[in-house]
Image: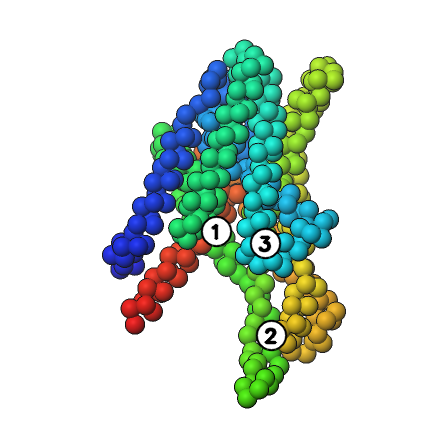
Amino acid sequence: MEKLKQIFKTPELRKKIFIVASLLLVFRVFATIPIPSVDFEKLKMLLSSSQLLGLFDLFSGGGISSLSVVMLGVGPYITATIVMQLLTMVFPYLKEIYYEQGEMGRAKFNRISRYLTVPLAALQGYGFLNLLQSQQVLITPSTFDILRNVVIITAGSMLLVWIGELISEQKIGNGISLLIFAGIVGRLPQIVKSLYFNYSPSQITTYASFVIMAIVVIAGVVFVNEGERKIPVSYSRRVRGNKMYGGVSTYLPLKVNQAGVIPIIFAISILLLPQFLAQASAFISPDFSLTFNNVVNSFLGNHAIYSLAYFLLVFAFTYFYTAITFDPSEISKNLQRSGGFIPGIRPGEPSATYLGKVINRITLFGALFLGLVAVLPNIMRIFTGVEALTLGGAGLLIVVAVALEVKKQIDSQLAMRDYEGV
């Protein structure tokens, strides 16, 4: 309570919080405005029969369940960012921009990502609308209607990217993450309502067990999300003129969950791909498209096979994304340039090899934990038999990670204000 009082007593911080809250409110308003020609009864049936579309709805902030003008959420921008990071492995120019040109390079990199978001949003929107049309969720749409809806939802995605950047400028959390966070939290009243009306006295043990397990899982997510391996680093002493530099010891933090929720987004994209391919193949052969679609639905409808595939994809992509974002050779070179070294390890290639071994070992635990949390909702459904009791998954990881990030940024701004006062 003292911290909250301190936050709202600080005029600058209070103003930033109100700006962020207003922008999130604008997002939630747009998330309730549907595109034209939607059969909501068939949409509800489609979402209830597809776990994958439910996950997609999660990342869109609930935009899919209402087929709103922002139904794709910030998904296209996240995809564009991931594609750009993958391209840094192929094109040295992009790698130089991202890693070596500092803040100006990052700004240029983000600008290119925003340009790439527009065609990706249009393609994703067109593919998704075709899927809805095949399920008769859209009421007799003409070619003009499809193109109009593609333009609307592409503009909606770009609007959310802009809102996310406005939120990030306030330095109270990452804007894109907060938009996803707001969409997930916005679903809580509906979940609580469903649990309340479906409750029966015979289920009191199930509900109590769920609450206890929820506390344990949230604590575990916080523990792993904040967990890190500290690699000691020492700096040699250097004399320049009459001054001596270096001679200090610090550490290099390696996070257990280095990849965050990106592997889950990758896995969902891969699992969604067969459905979109099945719809796209209708242009070549309607019969083949129908057969392909039935095979995909039977695969995804099996909880055990779906959960196993989801777990393996998350596990593999955790290693893959960590390898992209954490380059032991580059870190070893930067340490050597600044006169730093790991005690007991020679600089250069031996240091890179050592860092590679350490990151592979801690990523193993992070990948197993991430995969387990991702499939935890399916496990809860199997054991409890209650659809509303879904614990874990991408939503929980995002909520915990964003809440911790916002807390840290607010604490840093309060600490800065205390120093200014002194």
Check disc 1 and give the amino acid type: Ala
Compared to residue 403, the image places residue 139 above or below, namely: above
Q: Which mark is residue 105?
A: 3
Counting other residues with Cα less than 10 Å from the Cα at mark 3, is it few (<14), some (14-19), or many (20 or more)? some
Q: Which mark is residue 401?
A: 1
Q: At numbered mark 1, what does the secondary structure look like: helix, strand or loop?
A: helix
Label 2 sits on residue: 233
* Separation of marks 1 and 2 at Cα, in angstroms: 27 Å
Nearest to the observer: residue 44 or residue 239: 239
Q: At numbered mark 3, what does the secondary structure look like: helix, strand or loop?
A: helix
Residue at x 30% of width, y 55% of height: 12
Describe residue 420's horizontal placement relative to residue 234 as left or right.
Answer: left
Check disc 3 and give the amino acid type: Gly
Quadrant housing the C terminus: bottom left
Q: Give how far across and how far down residue 121 sits, in percent.
A: 57, 32
Describe residue 101's horizontal placement relative to residue 59 as left or right.
Answer: right
Check disc 2 and give the amino acid type: Val
N-term-proximal mark, 1 vs 2: 2
Q: Which mark is residue 205?
A: none
